[in-house]
């Protein structure tokens, strides 16, 4: 097999298996090529992945050596994507009764969701995360997109237990903005004790849901390494109950009378330079 | 930029944008390469994608010509994957009280889910599908995986309306196995009238949920082009209310007393040859 063919197959393999440790003999067998040829191939792939802003190859040398693709989303590309998202969300047609914002079309677009997932995964790339946790239902696609790039499973917290998931642990918590008592449930066998988790959700107002998830996860001795939300609402009346989180977007104002919405980039990279 | 670099960037672009029509000038500008060089690159990529069993490039010649990546999962690879899945599911530890089967770990594995999505998308590749529809919550990750490969959006039917989705259409239906009356809701603005849809769900017993979804979709004048379920239960007592569907797996027996489970490939390719 020629180098040009190998490069295509290698690119496909890495993109399909992010963060998977692969030993070089696997590739030399697959392509009937010498280890040194494969090694040169990997240099080319690595250089090009970095050039395209999609990550890099991590090489481990020595006997049990190999290679791993670490996906990334360059800050420049991510900021351009977030800016475009802000623009899309400021369309007044999105205002729903009650001052809510229609976002289901964005969450329903697999390509958008994939990009959002890649941004979170890049941000959390150096953390030690075993599992992504979300709450049904709107956070689910985002959680899978993050988990795909981190190469870890997803666990879904529900509002009510399901017979098809076996025995569960449940907690009651007070919702942050409506002050109502709500329930959250997680099947016992879905999350090993002491896991390092990352919480992903689509929206955060006062943060009651995130706090509820933290309490439920504490029952599993889980360590919450990171919290990521797509959009946070800037709500001056409520005091936020969650301190540490990363948001892509901040909805600063939904004015029903003036029929206008203001959305700005969230806290993911702090204040923009320049 | 050298051919080897271009091949990596092209492979990434196609895998990231399945079924997206791209005109050749886009690539010649991006890589500062002649149209004929790009055309040769595409031949190499096409050949290699087919060799790897991940699809092919569809070329359109002429003034508005271009190229489109059509993902595929070769039947041979898909059958091997399905056989492995059957084996995994026959583990007696999966039996839950009531004779249910624990499958959340499989549905929680993004890499598994991606492969399942690719198999359905290959099967439905020639159909004219605008939107993938599923019902909350277990079908959601599968629906996104299918939609990613078909390059179409996802719409989620819910059991109860959400304030963040605006006005909704709801129906009541009788569940196939429990004979209970249940509700299904779809936000008005989530599905354009007359869409061509594909229904995806994780599990089907008598088929009441699928029938309910069909009734709800009829309110939107939608044309159901295909129905795909991950697993169907072979239930002799109930008469199935759904005729046309594609399943990857068929759970033929869950015997609590003998502590054993039988799972076989579903109807996706009819009876296996050989």
Image (cartoon, coloured by chain):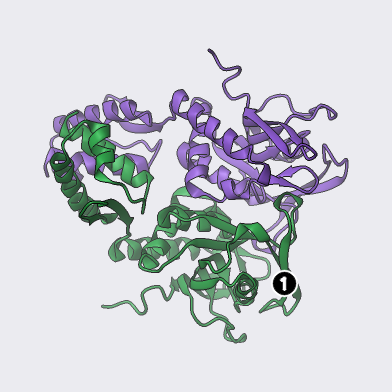
Chain colours: A green, B purple
The total of numbered circles placed on residues is 1
Residue A2 vs residue B213: left or right? left
A107 vs A207: above or below: above
Identify the residue at horizontal 26%, vertical 39% (top origin).
A27
Identify the residue at horizontal 60%, vertical 77% (top origin).
A207
Q: Position of residue B1 (x, y in %)?
A: 12, 45
B264 vs A206: above or below: above
Residue B127 vs residue B181: left or right? left
Identify the residue at horizontal 30%, vertical 52% (top origin).
A68
Residue A36 placement: quadrant: top left
Which sits in the foreground, B237 or B135?
B237
B226 vs A244: above or below: above
Which sits in the foreground, B90 or B160?
B90
- Secondary structure, mark 1, is strand
Which sits in the foreground, A209 or B249?
B249
The residue to which callout 1 is attached is A171
Q: Is residue A115 visible?
A: no
Which residue lies most toward the top here?
Answer: B274
Which sits in the foreground, A67 or B33?
A67
Q: Position of residue B246 (x, y in %)?
A: 62, 28
Q: Position of residue B84 (x, y in %)?
A: 53, 34
Q: Position of residue A71 (x, y in %)?
A: 33, 56
Residue A91 vs residue A156: left or right? left
Label 1 resides on the chain identified as A
Identify the residue at horizontal 83%, vertical 38% (top origin).
B177
Q: Is residue A226 visible?
A: yes
Mark 1 Cα shell of 10 Å, populated few (<14), some (14-19), many (≥20):
some
């Amino acid at each position: 097999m020629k180098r040009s063919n190998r490069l295509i197959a290698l690119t496909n393999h890495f993109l399909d298996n992010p963060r998977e440790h692969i030993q070089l003999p696997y590739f030399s067998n697959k392509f009937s090529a010498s280890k040194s040829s494969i090694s040169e191939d990997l240099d080319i792939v690595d250089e090009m992945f970095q050039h395209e802003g999609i990550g890099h190859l991590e090489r481990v040398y020595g006997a049990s050596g190999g290679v791993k693709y670490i996906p990334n989303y360059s800050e420049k590309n991510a900021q351009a994507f977030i800016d475009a998202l802000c623009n899309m969300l400021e369309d007044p047609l999105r205002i729903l009764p009650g001052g809510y914002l229609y976002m289901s079309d964005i969450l329903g677009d697999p390509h958008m969701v994939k990009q959002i997932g890649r941004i979170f995964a890049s941000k959390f790339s150096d953390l030690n995360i075993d599992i992504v946790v979300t709450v049904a239902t709107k956070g689910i696609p985002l959680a899978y997109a993050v988990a795909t790039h981190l190469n870890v499973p997803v666990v879904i917290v529900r509002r009510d237990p399901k017979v098809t998931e076996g025995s569960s642990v449940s907690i009651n918590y007070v919702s942050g903005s409506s002050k109502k008592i709500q329930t959250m449930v997680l099947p016992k066998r879905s999350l090993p004790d002491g896991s390092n988790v990352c919480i992903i959700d689509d929206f955060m107002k006062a943060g009651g849901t995130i706090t509820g998830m933290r309490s439920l996860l504490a029952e599993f001795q889980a360590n919450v390494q990171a919290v990521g939300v797509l959009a946070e609402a800037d709500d001056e009346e409520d005091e936020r109950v969650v301190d540490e989180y990363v948001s892509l977007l901040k909805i600063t104002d939904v004015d029903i009378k003036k029929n206008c919405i203001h959305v700005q980039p969230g806290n993911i990279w702090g204040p923009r330079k320049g």
